[in-house]
Amino acid sequence: MSGPNFALYYAGDAYSTAAKIMGRQSAGKALMKGVARRWPDGEIHGFGPNRAAGKTMAQQLKRDGHEGLVRWRPVPGDAVLEQVGAVYYPAPVTQDLAHIRNTRGPTAYSLFGVTHTLSSEAGMDSLSRLVLAPFQAWDGLICTSSVALSVAHRLQAEMREWQIEHVGATRFNTPSMKIIPLGVDAPACARTPAQIEQARTALGVKADEVAFLFAGRLIFHAKANPAVYYRAVEAAQAHVAHPIVCIEAGVFPNDHVADGYRRARADLAPSIRFIEVDGADSVAYDRAWKAADVFTSLSDNIQETFGLTPVEAMAAGLPNLVSDWNGYKDTVRDGIDGFRIPTLAPGPRSGAGSDLAQRHATGADNYDFFIGRASMATVLAFEPLVERIVELASDPDLRRRMGEAGRARAVAEFDWPVILDRYCDFAAELGELRRAAATLRKRPAIPFPIRPDPFVLFQSYPTHHVGDDWKIEAVPLDDRGLDRFLGLHMARYVIDDQVLPEATLRAVHSEAAKGGQTVGSLLNSVGRTPASWKALMWLMKLDIVRAAP
């Protein structure tokens, strides 16, 4: 193939990390480099509202090594674009873009986009509206993980049901959706022994230290809350002969959050040495990756949909220690490329998050508090985490085997040229569907479409759901009791009088300490409310209370 069978809708923010360093921008930047690698002298078609964007696209591809032609197609398109057959949009396709396409005729070409964050209002809206006009059955969506596909199906089903009940709708679009992961620049991630040695020397990592790396945004409410990780590393160190050092490479959003991390490290992992690396310093950030022995990303947040860094770790030959959550379920093979740690969240029938969705929708909580409150009701299994840290820190052969397995898989399945060939296959399938008719699926109506309880919408994320018949056990605490944890900003920030009162936390803990309780009996004793559910999960998250079937 001399070039891709789709045009690229080019918006600079989606393909550059110059203004913002987040997963979406990193993936888009790597995609452009992948296009240059896959079709180094091919003809690439760009698409967009102005030629300035086309010039920027051509310049970016040239910097990435592309030596072929870049042809710009203006909105709404032309005959050449119709021959190409499809347009790739770097997010779920907007209604405006579909309307614009339809001015040339609905069968002019296909539009397909890709999922990123699904928990924002814009993300939910864009997925749910794919079933409505002006989209067509030959328009599509790439879901980067199986959980992204499940969320898209739920939102679209709710939109259909609401439209049927309230406006008597009888015809809907059925978008084509396919799971295709994000890619990585596998060659660029590779490490040599010399690079590893140089990086460890530069960062001051000693020969006998085992370096666990977290790389990404350092923000506990929107990425991964590290409190339980700090406790687990501290506990694991007592069972490991070699010292563990934790490298945290990334960017803090502000000094207040940075101070919260540093205080938590000192309190929860006093015997562990931490190396803090500024993610905005590209040289230092690269050293952090080169110096590591193990990569860890214990995401507990509904804003995470795919999770690019574990795949980058695989490409770097690093074993992964990740949560059994979101896209990590698809990418990291437990026991092969690394370990996945089980996660827990309230079940879809608990009602524990109905107030969170409504508070976000009405503006009582901003997006950060919406996802942060949900995160503090998401639990990472503590004891399995400690055991896996001990295994990885103690066994260099295990680290080597897992790193080699991950590297082989990243090259074979996640390198961007491989992923782009799958994009081409999807674009070809959409072309074959352009004459297909939309189908109608009937389901019971719902009261509030596309703004459901997050624990209903994201029910496929955790390993298990906490049940009423689970047994409760309170873990003995030191003399400071609950106050030790209530003083941690990364744990306390979700506590307030309306959503999670401190009094409710103390009441749930006091009831659990009596012993002989189940989840159901405890909640009935203190009053079964969304707050009591979140209080229980908050205590479980920090391993103050444990629950098991």
Image: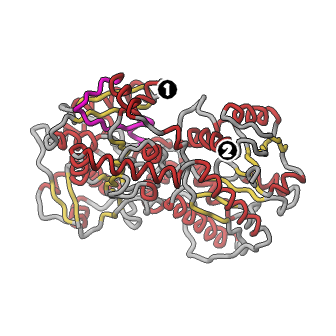
Image mark for residue 66 = none
Q: Dot 1: within a 10 Å radius of its alpha carbon, few (fewer than 14), some, or many (20 or more) residues?
A: few
Is 444 located above or below residue 322 in the figure? below
Give the structural element (helix, strand or loop) at label 2.
helix
| Residue denoted by label 2 | 35
Residue 470 magenta-drawn? no
Residue ID at (21%, 44%) = 394
Residue 502 appears in the picture as rendered: yes
**Mark closer to the chain start, 2 or 1:** 2
Residue 208 magenta-drawn? yes
Give the structural element (helix, strand or loop) at label 1.
helix
Pick whichever, 354 or 209, lies toward us: 209
Q: CA distance from mark 2 to mark 1?
A: 23 Å
Pick whichever, 549 or 479, lies toward us: 549
Q: Position of residue 445 (x, y in %)?
A: 57, 72
Residue 503 appears in the picture as rendered: no
- Label 1 amino acid? Ser
Image mark for residue 282 = 1
Residue ID at (53%, 51%) = 414
Q: Dot 2: within a 10 Å radius of its alpha carbon, few (fewer than 14), some, or many (20 or more) residues?
A: many
Magenta region, residue range? 203-223
Q: Quadrant of residue 279?
A: top left
Q: Position of residue 546 (x, y in %)?
A: 20, 56
Q: Position of residue 389 (x, y in %)?
A: 25, 46
- Label 2 amino acid? Val
Pick whichever, 160 or 401, lies toward us: 401
Pick whichever, 204 or 17, lies toward us: 204
